[in-house]
Image (spheres, grey):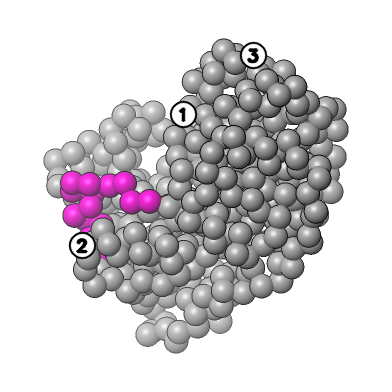
């Protein structure tokens, strides 16, 4: 008999954590029946597998977000208003009636990580942490420190992330490492689709897939692009992703006369056709947790020019064709000479081994009761 699993997620907007959830669901589809509770909804959402049962309950958000998403007369808006009267706002929500074998708080932001402890009945409870830094303080940090100790395990996507949290909290938390998994067969199949954006491109075809946010350091990419123009290098740079920095990046692209060189294409349902057809993948993040887009690009054995951070150093140890750069000058040189690089095929047969082993562990235990 399949185990019953609840996953509580924030939003399904396009992003790395949402993509990792899709891959996690793909890995467990034959093992468990999944109820997915989404805390909020957005217009542009990643499609979920048809077999996942999305459940709806009124959730507590900021009053403004609830008014925007749910409406003035919704139960969520009323709860969100009531929540402002409580220190722990999520506790105004009712408990779920259904008992689960496993309950998972998937995002590291928002109230889901507290809700699963206080309002969900389950034999085992797990929290996931996908971010490459810890940026909370004040009451959020206090609550994280309190609640993460209550989970059966807190899964981090890497040892490096675990060490960051351990240093921040300095309390007894049952940590484990669960890296992001990837569906290699599906990615290879999607990579076969035509990619007109690169078919019509001239020069070196550069790709970046990243949220348009500060930690992704896309400004460095624009500086590199400007230098390539100064060096009379022919190139086309496509950036896939969406985020708060779109307007400022568009302005910088215009100011540096890069409008015919660098293109912000927004979220793409199939980034893999771009990965398959690029000449080089470039990403200069300030920090990462487990860089899923880099692992996905490695499936196509593409050369990658990346910033010299711990997460990318770990990637360099796992796959070929990775060059780490500390400076703009170094990155410019690497991209300009990309056609001269010897390319090695990646053996990715082991890239999912740890992921699949840990997934098996999560659902291997014997339920305490039939619930």
Labels in figure, total: 3
In front here: 321 or 10? 321
Q: Residue at x 47, y 62 (%)?
A: 157
Q: For numbered disc 3, what is the local secondary structure?
A: loop
> Vertically, is 188 above or below 237?
below
Q: Earlier in the sequence, mark 1 or mark 2?
A: 2
The answer to whether 5 appears left or right of 196 in the picture is left
Residue 140 among magenta residues: yes
Pair 3/1: label in front: 3
Residue ID for mark 3: 257
At label 2, counting other C-alpha atoms closer than 10 Å, the crowd grade (few under 14, some 14-19, many 20 or more) is some
At label 1, counting other C-alpha atoms closer than 10 Å, the crowd grade (few under 14, some 14-19, many 20 or more) is few
Residue 231 among magenta residues: no
Q: For numbered disc 1, what is the local secondary structure?
A: loop
- Res 262 quadrant in image: top right
Q: Position of residue 89 (x, y in %)?
A: 21, 47
Q: Earlier in the sequence, mark 3 or mark 1?
A: 1
């Amino acid at each position: 008999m399949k185990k019953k699993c609840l996953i509580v997620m924030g939003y399904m907007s396009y992003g790395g954590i949402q993509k990792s959830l899709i891959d996690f669901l793909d890995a467990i589809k034959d093992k468990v029946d999944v109820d997915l509770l989404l805390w909020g909804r957005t217009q542009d959402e990643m499609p979920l597998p048809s077999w996942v049962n999305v459940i709806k309950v009124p959730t507590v958000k900021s009053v403004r977000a609830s008014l925007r998403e749910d409406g003035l007369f919704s139960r969520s808006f009323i709860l969100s208003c009531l929540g402002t009267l409580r220190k722990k706002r999520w506790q105004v929500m009712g408990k779920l009636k259904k008992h689960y074998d496993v309950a998972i708080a998937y995002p590291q932001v928002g109230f889901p990580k507290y809700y699963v402890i206080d309002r969900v009945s389950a034999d085992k409870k797990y929290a996931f942490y996908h971010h490459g830094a810890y940026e909370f303080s004040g009451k959020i940090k206090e609550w994280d420190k309190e609640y993460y100790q209550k989970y059966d395990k807190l899964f981090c996507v890497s040892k490096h992330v675990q060490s960051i949290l351990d240093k921040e909290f300095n309390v007894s938390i049952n940590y484990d490492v669960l890296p992001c998994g990837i569906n290699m067969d599906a990615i290879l199949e999607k990579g076969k689709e035509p990619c007109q954006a690169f078919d019509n491109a001239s020069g070196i075809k550069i790709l970046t897939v990243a949220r348009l946010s500060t930690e992704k350091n896309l400004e460095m990419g624009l500086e590199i692009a400007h230098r390539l123009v100064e060096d009379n290098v022919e190139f086309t740079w496509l950036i896939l992703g969406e985020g708060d920095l779109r307007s400022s990046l568009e302005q910088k692209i215009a100011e540096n006369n890069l409008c015919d060189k660098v293109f912000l294409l927004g979220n793409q349902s199939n980034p893999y056709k771009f990965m398959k057809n690029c000449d080089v993948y470039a990403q200069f993040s300030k920090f990462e947790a487990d860089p899923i887009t880099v692992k996905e690009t490695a499936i196509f054995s593409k050369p990658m020019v990346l910033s010299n951070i711990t997460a990318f150093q770990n990637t360099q140890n796992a796959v070929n064709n990775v060059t780490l750069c500390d400076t703009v000058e170094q990155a410019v040189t690497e991209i300009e000479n990309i056609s001269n690089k010897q390319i090695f095929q990646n053996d990715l047969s082991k890239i999912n081994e740890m992921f699949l082993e840990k997934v098996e562990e999560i659902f291997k235990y014997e339920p305490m009761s039939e619930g």
